[in-house]
């Protein structure tokens, strides 16, 4: 078994003005019948690139990247004039654009009776979710586990809270949630392998957005993964 190596995965590019950049990958969504996947980079605050004065933009805004092999979308949030989402083909903006998504050997981590010692020995963990689109296509979502709780006293239990991750639009209808790059952005909550709860990003008043759109998807398959020993 193999899994995305999120410690090394990145997106790199060169703009037409000659600026080189790299951005970490924090989530992927892959459709079974497609050779391309969708990749998510983390949100950062915008800065004055190579500036000599104040480096953070004023007024401030944040942005992050969603990309496939041929197109990209920039999600922007803040009070700066013109800070709007946009999508484009890579060739319109970049002279080169590459997605590096190396894989490593992986092993499943059993969720039944999962305890703190197993988490510590298996860290870092990632999660893999398999779910069906409304048209029947199978999607595989992968992302690192940022936070996990376990309990062994009494009824054994675990709960993963992590994100944001990519939720393909065709897997669920989320009223008023923001769609960009064909996906919603959502934080995920998992305490069983057949169901995931979501808080998706969408309008929250005063021209701002927040992770406030709740949804639940049943009938999924969930695996917790660790790096396999060499």
Image (cartoon, rainbow, N blue to C red):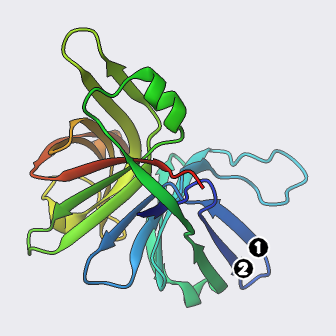
Residue at 54% from the left image edge and 52% from the top image edge = 42
Q: Which x, y percent locates residue 6?
A: 55, 56
Q: Judging from the image, what secondary structure is the residue with disc 1 in?
A: strand
Mark 1: few, some, or many residues within 10 Å (few <14, many ≥20)? some
Can you see residue 118?
Answer: yes
Going by the picture, which residue comes out furthest to the top?
A: 153
Residue at 30% from the left image edge and 15% from the top image edge = 152
Q: Judging from the image, what secondary structure is the residue with disc 2 in?
A: strand
Viewer-proximal residue among 222 and 65 = 222
Instruction: Work out whether mark 1 precedes mark 2 in sequence or the reverse, and give the earlier one.
Output: 2
Mark 2: few, some, or many residues within 10 Å (few <14, many ≥20)? some
Kindly indicate the quadrant of the structure image that contains residue 156: top left
Identify the disc placed on residue 20. 1
How far apart are the alpha carbons under marks 1 and 2?
A: 4 Å
Q: Which x, y percent locates residue 184?
A: 30, 57
C-beta proximity under 8 Å, tags 1 and 2: yes
Going by the image, does 42 lie left or right of 154?
Answer: right
Identify the disc placed on residue 14. 2
Q: Which x, y percent locates residue 30?
A: 34, 71
Viewer-proximal residue among 177 and 208 = 177
Q: Which x, y percent locates residue 219?
A: 9, 52
Going by the image, does 209 lie left or right of 72?
Answer: left
Q: Is residue 167 above or below residue 78?
A: below
Kindly indicate the quadrant of the structure image that contains residue 36: bottom left
Q: Is residue 168 above or below residue 99?
A: above
């Amino acid at each position: 078994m193999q899994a995305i190596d999120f410690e090394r995965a990145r997106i790199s590019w060169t703009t037409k003005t000659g600026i080189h950049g790299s951005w970490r990958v924090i989530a992927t969504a892959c459709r079974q019948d497609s050779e391309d996947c969708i990749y998510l980079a983390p949100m950062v605050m915008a800065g004055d690139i190579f500036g000599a004065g104040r480096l953070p933009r004023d007024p401030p805004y944040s942005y992050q990247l969603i990309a496939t092999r041929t197109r990209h979308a920039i999600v922007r949030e803040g009070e700066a004039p013109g800070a709007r989402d946009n999508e484009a083909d890579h060739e319109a903006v970049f002279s080169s654009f590459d997605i590096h998504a190396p894989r490593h050997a992986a092993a499943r981590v059993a969720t039944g009776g999962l305890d703190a010692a197993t988490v510590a020995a298996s860290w870092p963990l990632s999660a893999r979710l398999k779910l069906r689109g409304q048209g029947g296509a199978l999607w595989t979502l992968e992302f690192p586990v940022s936070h996990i709780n376990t309990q062994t006293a009494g009824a054994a239990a675990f709960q993963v809270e992590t994100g944001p991750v990519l939720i393909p639009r065709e897997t669920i209808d989320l009223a008023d949630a923001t769609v960009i790059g064909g996906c919603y952005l959502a934080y995920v909550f998992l305490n069983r392998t057949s169901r995931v709860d979501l808080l998706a990003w969408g309008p929250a008043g005063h021209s701002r957005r927040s992770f406030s759109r709740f949804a639940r998807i049943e009938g999924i398959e969930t695996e917790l993964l660790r790096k396999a020993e060499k």
